[in-house]
Image (tube, rainbow, N blue to C red):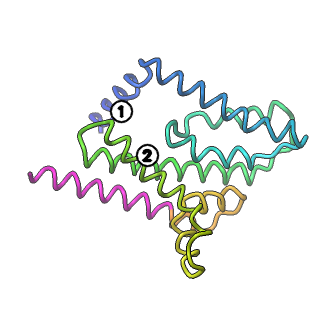
Amino acid sequence: MNLAATITRKEIKSYFNSPAAYIVLVIFILLSGWFFASPLFINNQANLRTLFGIIPVSLIGVGLLLTLVHFITIMLLGTNVDFGAIFCGYIGLLFLGAVYSSIGIFASSITSNQVVSLIISFFIIFFFFIIKFFLFFVPDFMVGIFQFISIDYHFSNITRGVIDTRNIIYFVSLIVLFLKLAQISLENRNWK
């Protein structure tokens, strides 16, 4: 366990020694603030739906690290807070981050090149996200299948404030699937 902690510390330290990490974090904060504040100023109504709609795309590159900023902003503005929707939204983000991480682990297990791993991860995640846009082009009997595969469909269900076991099973299944594929890939690599 100490070896894992040492490696984790080393990786985090090397990540934050790079100026690019801070640039990405600043861009993420600015974009998130924009998507939080826009409905407030346009509709004169505090609504987190727009924010939770854009975060899945942002998580591809950044992760969960900065989402707590919005909760503090809501509290400082003195707006009414729907804790159920926020709690479910963060649970959804946690599952989404775990799925994205497991996909990244799988992609890095099949190649030793970091850039190739990044590209593979991006396209797998992009596939799960973009599939919802094909619902209009498939026959009616396949709409349910495409909807079930879409990661955004399940994430949107959770951010509505209701936790359905089907959505949790979907996220846990994806996490287990990609971690198992990574394990198989690493075991096959060790035999060669």
Q: Residue at x 91, y 40 (%)?
A: 44
Q: Residue furthest right?
A: 44
Horizontal arrangement in the rendering, residue 62 relative to residue 89 (left or right) = left
Q: Is residue 174 magenta?
A: yes
The chief SS type of the magenta part is: helix
Q: Residues within 10 Å of mark 2 (few under 14, many from 20)?
A: some
Residue at the extreme bottom: 141
Residue at 33%, 48% (x, y): give it.
107
In the picture, which quadrant includes the N terminus? top left
- Residue at the extreme front: 137
Look at mark 1 in the image and give the residue it sits on: 8
Mark 2 or mark 1: name the one nearer the start of the chain. Answer: 1
Question: Which of 78/167 is in front?
Answer: 167
Question: 140 left or right of 191?
Answer: right
Q: Which residues are magenta?
A: 171-192
- Please state which of residues 51 and 94 is positioned toward the viewer in this rendering: 51
| Above or below for 188 versus 116 | below
What's the CA distance linking mark 2 and mark 1? 22 Å
Q: Is residue 184 magenta?
A: yes
Looking at the picture, tell me which residue is in the foreground, 170 or 112: 112
Which residue bears the numbered disc 2? 122
Judge depth for marks 2 and 1 and give the one in front.
Answer: 2
Query: Where on the picture, by quarter, is residue 4?
Result: top left
